[in-house]
Structures are given as C-alpha cells and as structure tokens.
Amino acid sequence: MGGASVFLIKPRRSFKVPVEAECISPDKFAGLNLEDLKKLKVFEGNRTYRLEELFYIKAVSKNSPSASVKIIMEGNFSKVWRIGEEMSTGEIVIKGNVGPFLGFRMRGGVIIVHGHAGPWLGAEMRDGIIEVHGCAGDHVGAVLRGERSLKGMSGGIIRVHGYAGAEVGACMNGGLIAIDGSCKAMPGVKMSGGSILIRGDCEGKAGARMTGGKIVVCGRVGEVLPTFYIDGIASSVKVKGEKIKGPFYLFLGDVLGDIECRGRLYVSVKNNPDFKVFESLLETMSDDC
Amino acid sequence: MEILIKNGYVYDPLNKVNGEIMDIAIKDGKIVESSEINLGKAKIIDASRKVVMPGGIDIHSHVAGPKVNTGRIMMVSDHYRSYMRSHHLLRRSGTGKYTPSTFLTGYRYARMGWTMVVEPASPPLKTRHTHEELNDIPILDKACLILVDSNRILLNYLDRKDHDGCKMFIKWLLMATKSYGLKLVDPGTAVLWSWGKGYGLDVDDKIEPYNITPGDIIKELCKIRAELKLPHPIHLHCNRLGIPGNYETTLKTMKYAPADDKVTLHLTHLQFNAYAGDSWANIGTGSETLTKYVNANNNLSIDIGQIDFGTAVTMTADAPFEFALFHMARWKWTGIDVESEAAAGIVPYKYKKKNLVNALQWCIGLELALLVKDPWRVMITTDHPNGAPFTRYPKIIALLMSRRFREKMFAKLNRRSVKRAVLPSIEREYSLYEIAVVTRAAPARLLGLDNIKGHLGVGADADVAIYDLNPEEIDFSKDYQSVIKAFKRALYTIKSGNVVVENGKVINDSCSKTFYVDFKSPPEEQFLNELREEFKRWYTIELANYVINESELGHAKPIYVGG
C-alpha cells in the first residue's frame, strides 16, 4: 500500500486472561501520532492498561496522519479480543493466531490472518474483506446471542482457508462466507440472504430455519433436515460470480422458517451417495406433472 | 455529616413552598433548622440559581424480583451493549439499558435525583428473591408490594365469604413477606390461565371455578385494607389491559373504589387501560371519560404508565395478555407460573413512532397526566421496563412542561393517531411546582410516608436533589432541552444526609432502607394451625420455610400500623 502509514505491533508477553483491544483498528489509529497511540486504553481482565504496556508499537513508515493506515501484527494474539471492531477503512495483517471477535461489526477495509482465528470471526459484519489462512472458531459471521435476526451479517466477504466451527453465518442477510475446509453443525441457521460456500464436509443440519439465501456444500453433508424439499439436480452453481462445478442436489426450505421455502441448499451429488433415494422422489414428481 | 444548601429555589409542595429562595440544613440524616448546625464544620453547597427539590419517588417500577431477572436473561443483547464500569471504592459495575442490573438501577435513579422506588409486583412465594435483589440496589429506599389477586387460599376464603379469615390471611401474608402493600394484577386471570383461559376477563365475569368476580376481590380487599389501616391504598392493574375498548372496563372498576375523602384505590399504568374502539384498526382514546371520572372522585389516584419510543421489555403478572402480545411482536416470550399464587409473562417489544397504536399510546399517556386537574392524584411512571426504561423520565417531564415540545413530536408520529388523539387540543403545561408534586410529594403521600419522605420540612429524611436549572431565567415552554438536560443528571443528590451524586456522577453508594408494614399483634395460634394444614394442600414448601425473617432484609425499616 503506497502512501500508507504502517504500524507494527507485537505483544510484550503472553496473556493469560482475555485482553479487550477494540482500539487496535485503522479507524482509531488514523490521525494519531505514535505517542498518542501508545496511550490508548486496553483491558486485561479487569485492569486498565495503556496500549504500550501490553504491546510494542513501532511506526514502520511515517506519513501524514491523514494517510490510510496499515497495521501489521506479529506474535500470538489468541487471547486478544475485538481487534478491528467497527473498522471502515485500512488494512490489518496478523502474522500469528488471533482471538475472538476479530472484525466484529466491520464496515470496510481488509483483514488478513496468517494463522488461526477465534470464534465470532466477522460477527455482524456489514462490509469489507476478511481472509484467514488457517482455521476459524465457531460462529463465523454470525449474529450475537439474543439479537434480532435482522442484525446478522449483511455484506462483505469472509474467506477461511482451513476449517470452521459451528453455526457459520447464523442469521446472515447478505455477503459471502467461503470455507475451504469442513465445518461443524448448523451452517446458515436462520439465514435470510447471502451465500455460504463450504468446499469440505459439514456435520449436518445445514440451513435450519433458513428463509432465503444460498448454501453450497461440496463435500459430505451428514443429513438434510426433513423440513427441506428436493427440487432438482443442478449441474453447476454460481456463488458471487464464481462458477462451481457439480452436479448438486437442490433442496428448498426450511418450511419451518417460511412456508414459501425461499432458501436454497445445494449438496454435492458425487460425495453423497446415500442421497440416491431423493432421485426416486424427483422421478415420481415429474410423472405427476 | 452536616450540610447546608444555600440560596436555592426550593420546591417543596408538602410544605407549600413554591420556588422561594431558602437554605436547607442537614444534620445526621435529617433536615434541621439552619441554626442547629455548626457552620465551621458543615459542608456548604452553593445552590444559588439552582432548583432544590426533595428526592424523587417512583411509585411503580419493576426493579427487582424473579420476573425482572428472567427479563434480564432474555435481553442478552441489552447487556453487552450498555454497561457502566466499576470505580474502585466508589461504585460497582453493571450492565443493561432496558433491564439494568441492581447496582446500575440504583445509580441511574440517583443520577436523576430519585431516592426511593417501589417494586410493585412480587409473588409472595418469591418475595425472598425480591428482597435479595432489593438489598443489592444501592442508594435508594425501597418497598415492595405483593400480588394477592390469584392466591388460591385467599380465593377460597373469599369464596366462603369468610371476611375475618381473609383479613387474617392478608395480615399474615404481609408479615410473612415483609412487604409494604397489596397489588392486584388483572384480578383472577392467573387462576384461569392455569387452564389456558383468562384473556379478556372482564371485571364482572365469574372466575371459574370460584363463585366470585374480579369486582368482588377489589371490593373486599379495599375493605380489608381500610380495616388493617395499611398506609398504601390497593394498587390495581385493571382487567382487560391492552385490549381496545378497555376504558369501559376501567370505568366500571373505578366504581368499586370505596367512597372516601382520601385515596382508596390507585389505578396503575392507566395508559394501557384507556383505549376506546373495538379493534386495533379503530382504536381510539378513552382518556377524556376516565379523567372526568377521576376529577369528580377524590378516592382515586392514577399513574400514567407513559411509553417512549424504542425497545422495552413488557413484563406483567397478566400472563394471558403477554401470550397474545407475543403473537403480535414475534420475538421472544417467557411464561412463568408461580404455584398457586400468580403467573407472569415477559415479552420484549419495540414501540414505533409510525405505528398507529404505539403513537396513540404515547398520546394517551400524556393526555391522562394533563387532563387530571389535581396533580396530587396523578404520578409519572413509565411502568419500567414495560413502557420505557425509567431513564426517560426527564423527557416525559419536559413533554408535560412544554407544549412546543409536544407539537414538535406530533410531526414525527403516525398522522392518523394524532388526528384521533385529544392531546393536540390540550394547552396545559405543568409548572415546576406541579412537577415536584407529581414526582415527589404525591407519591410520598400515597405511600403514607409524607411525614418523613417527599418534603424538606424539619424532621424529614434528608433526601434532596439539586438541579442545574434557573426558573427565573429559563422559559420551560420554549427551552425544554435545558429541562431534559437538568433532570437527566442531577447536580447533587443527597440521600440520608450523604452526598451520593455530585455533578451527575455517583460518588457514594451506601445507605438504603427497605420499608415494610408490621403489626403489633401477631396472628392467633389457631389461625396458624389452620393455615399450616392449608399449606400442605396448596404449596410445595412448609409454612415455616415461607416466612421471611427481618434479618434477610438489608436495612429493615418497619412501619407499624394498627389493625
């Protein structure tokens, strides 16, 4: 990034209790010089610290304070929560593992993680890009507990190159979540829009109570809920402009969420040989028509 | 600690002081003559060009108890969004905006200059929980009212027309639960709700399987309250709450109040019971009819139960209504059944400006406050957290004081509802003196605590609020923003002679009492033996485990009554 002011952050020691560091975000860093940055407040457990007391901070390239901000983080941040909360511009690159709530309610910008991410990655995200080269925890791009389902992820892209946990994209309304590995149970629970692409397997219950949107599972799907109807076999499916070769069984549902069944669940034909049963259903349907 | 508050504009309606410049002297937690304090040692607060009032009293606010706690559990989202950090040795931390935790409840009330709160609906069986939570509310003085309307043992007495048994049971119940008064919620519905019925039970309908009506319960308990000389009148949440056309039921209910010069029946959150029309589409306001009756009869008092737009958590012992509301709101619902005593429901709800019904509810609440001529019989509440959190009181005060503010709000509301409301034609604006009446003096008098609370005369408890508001310079009608600002954060709040809030910040969180009524003569042994047998039939616990000891209350303050 030419012309950006670049900061390097390293932890001073390993943390035993969670560190709440919502101030590590390009939006909060913008317009501050290095001395002011060091005075930002972070919590370790129930104690308040200045940012420099827990982390080394170095300005790699100095530019005018108005320039866009890039934050490079090196080390183990797996106990550090809420990095990049509500960020709207700039870039964060993390070379190591990172804790929960990375990119929480993010509105723009880019986050790249060369390691593993914790749970609630990109929760309630609005826009922007998150790329994780390792694995992610539960609740990727999900809505927080107790919230109305309208508050779920509504835009942006989350790519996880490894595995992901349960409830990927819960209550999602828009955007894309792409998982290269497998994920645990209930991806896209209560989702109403957007797309989830799982290149690996899924533990089951995909799209429970979904009322819209698209879930594509390229590997084994475990089971499809009985509240889904089979609609046909698609030779390929498009996810945000990318064509994914099939063939796929197309299920519509979830009838428990919405009687109109506007949610679509694509399940690979090749990797799910048990689903041959559904093909007979398709034939009877065409006979009736 | 001695404090002298100098040169403030004092508003003290119980002593008929209307904005006179006076000094208030405080010594050992009481208000004393200015000559009694040692000027060399005393802390002197310069209140010139400021307003000095007694501490506010909230007569109806669900701040503690099992129902509130379930509301907290349901509103997870509320608790990670709104929080207050702890301050070493000064205050504890807390979370929640619509259903705040106990500590935060105390701090937020104190920041507004309020010093007493009444929890109005505690099921007797779970009052131990209510007291545990009340003990944890700092700063404020507290009291709780118990739900008695659907108690099976009481209904059995009523069914047998056993007046003495009824009276004895109520007396024992108040002593056993260490509570302050009686609350009736939609009399009889909780019994019917056990069979899934009870929605829309009218005041003259029979409560199956008993041979009594809600009206009988109200009449009988009003009589018992008078005989026991309880300080607080019967606190009544009328039947058919939240159903269009319910103002007729409310009017019928009002006629059950025994005639007297003093208030014998308090109708709570009347806004929810003042709808005309017969469906949600043609809902109208019944406030004119109701306030006309209240104006003509001195034995009634009301609190408004104003709503404010935004999220609220409705929680009431009227369980069938909550179940109906859940089907309208479609978010979350909890239903609770308390053995043979009560039921409850909790539903989070969002009031919207552009919604016909919600906008009309907003108008009706203010209409009630403005159309009742005698400010001593109307009180400001939001029925926290049902209509809005209590932190919206400053806004409601400003709305009552400024017609201009109300007109500004009309532009944002649903147009059809403004056309149906009476509010646009009302010109009345509350004066600061009347605000002091409705938020301080009137609740104190209604609670029967007007000798020690709600005034600044010699001998009163030293609960004082000082607001940064100059009544000589500010025209409240035009500059309503400064009213909101001043009431939102009191300049000083003094509780029992200690400064607890300074410049809108809580600096001390000690000193609070729980009031309850106590009787000099305990119930007879024969009655207790009968009751023990009844308990075996109706309850899962023994009578001995039901009774709450005085030691379980943080700072117990019994009020002895006759009878």
Image: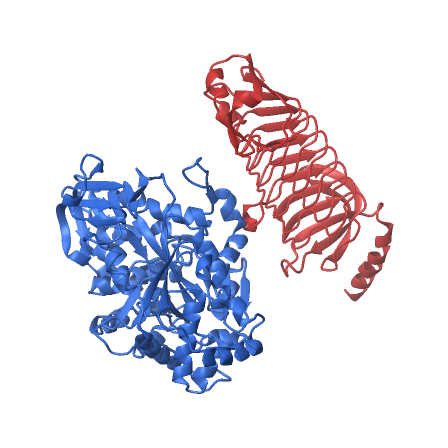
- Percent x, y for residue B269? 35, 64
Quarter where residue A17 is shown: top right
Up-down relation of residue B202 to residue A225 (above or below) = below
Chain the render paints blue: B
The residue drawn where x is 50% and y is 81% is B530
Q: Is residue B281 visible?
A: yes
Up-down relation of residue A140 to residue B217 (above or below) = above
Q: How many marks?
A: 0
- Percent x, y for residue A182? 76, 40
Quick check: B138 left or right of B50? right
Q: Nearer the viewer, residue B77 or B136?
A: B136
- Percent x, y for residue B383? 38, 59
Up-down relation of residue A211 to residue B250 (above or below) = above
Q: Nearer the viewer, residue B464 or B561?
A: B561
Quick check: A110 left or right of B245? right
Quick check: B352 left or right of B76? left
Chain the render paints red: A
- Percent x, y for residue A242? 71, 36
Quadrant of the drawing holding the N terminus of chain A: top right
Q: Nearer the viewer, residue B447 or B313?
A: B447
Quick check: B471 left or right of A94? left
Quadrant of the drawing holding the C terminus of chain A: bottom right
Quarter where residue A211 is shown: bottom right
